Image (cartoon, rainbow, N blue to C red):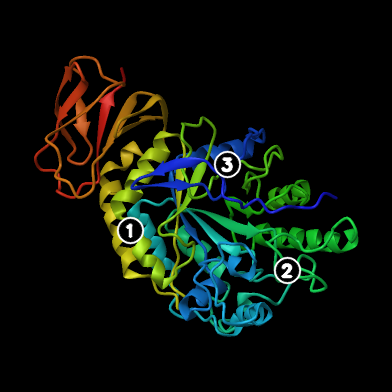
Amino acid sequence: MKKIRLILILINIIVSLPGSAQEFIQAKSETYVTPTDPAVIKKLEQWQDLKFGMFIHYGLYTQAGATGLSNQGSSWSLTNMSFVQRDTTMEYSDFKQKYFSQINSFNPQKLNPEKLARLGKKAGMKYLIFTSKHHDGFNLFDTRQTNFSIMHGAYKNNHNANILKYFFEAFRKQGYMVGAYYSKPDWHSPYYWWDKYPTSNGGENYNTREYPERWDKFIQFTNNQVAELTNGDYGNVDILWIDAWGQEWGMNRKAEIARSKQPGILIIERGTPGTGYEDYQTPEQGIPKEQMSHPWESCITLGKRWSYVPADEQYFKSSAQVIHTLVEIVAKGGSLLLGFSPKADGTIAQSIIDRLEEIGKWTSRNGEAIYNTRNTEIYHRGNTWFTQSKDGKKIYAITNLEEGKAIPSTVTWQGNEPAGGSVIKCLQTGKKVVWKKTENGIEITLPKELPDNLPAVAFVLTKV
């Protein structure tokens, strides 16, 4: 068995997120295998209508951020990766023990998935991906494979201790598709990180070819957990979002298990091309340079961290930056999966609430240009991005406006220009606009009643 290697080296592909150039943390796979299962194809078409999702990383790493044990905002503080941030005043063995012992103090009594689901819905979010288990192996669902779970810690007596189920039920009531993030690596499992050897960069820390029986036990462990997540105990699960690296995980069996109980479930084994189990691609912390015709999403954090860390608030993107990012991604044929989380006590930071409410003010008026759309051949001209209705009868033009600047009196673009006499309507006001053709392209006179802080102005026009 080939040694499974970590593939979380920063990829040197520069992309442009609004406001700053960034690098992919994990780029998209080089190839895409189109699904052939009719149920999967149907579900994938439904997912492509949604465009905007919420990605919640929550667990012991959130507690570590609250106490100062680690500001990583994820479980990577358990590894020796160069980007790791943790308390350097203690020995690693002490840190690891203290990290895992947080099961006895992580107690989010103020957790309120219903409130978060309502806030996300108002913001225009349509689907949820929630961490059932991150790489640290701490489970936020009622697994029978280990006691290292929310059901055996400080939160165990809460009537909603099964946090994954609690979230799924709350979000389904608000009409979301729901998906379970699941980490194949498990740094708490002795069959992945064997205490006979030092821990490492995140991969398994022993030679699996020399100890195949041990590795087989780990594969069975992961298969059993996939079965638990998809056996119906958590209702209809739309997406199984599998995070990891390498291809020797028995994905055929995992997919068989999941789809035996959840026909049509989308499986996202990210970063492992050619397996046939990456129903849509999901590059991390970046936007592809060019439009892509197959299904994809960008998973991007609100700040720099996946889970809430107090110091990360200073890096939170503005609502305008999020909207600009959403517009660009959708015009390129993708969806935005925006990452943030509650605090360790379960409350939601006011800065997150404010941004979701501001985003919702825009999507509630301009969402027609985002949801249920598909990409166009000409998808970008300057600050203007284009989408079209699924039936191809309407073209949408969305001009991203410069944050902090006065709204211009006109906007101009080239390409996707309507025939003379066509009606163009501003989605923000619902009214027709005055427009004309010039040597620089189509010029639209913006309505005077547009709000001063409008991040983008969207139009619907007759297709040329």
Query: CB atoms at circles 1 and 2 under 8 Å apart?
Result: no
Mark 1 to mark 2 CA distance (whole Å) = 39 Å
Q: Residues within 10 Å of mark 3 (few under 14, many from 20)?
A: many
The label nearer to you, 2 versus 3, is 2
User: What's the residue type where badge 3 is placed?
Assistant: Lys
Sequence order check, earlier mark of 1 and 3: 3
Q: SS at mark 1?
A: helix
Residue at the image position 76 percent from the left and 68 percent from the top: 193
User: What's the residue type where badge 2 is placed?
Assistant: Thr
Position of residue 313 measured from the top left corner of the image (x, y, whole percent): 36, 66
**Residue 213 visible in the picture:** yes
In this image, 381 relative to 32: left or right? left
Position of residue 210 measured from the top left corner of the image (x, y, whole percent): 90, 59
Which residue is label 3 attached to?
Answer: 28
Which residue is label 1 attached to?
Answer: 356
In this image, 90 relative to 114: left or right? right
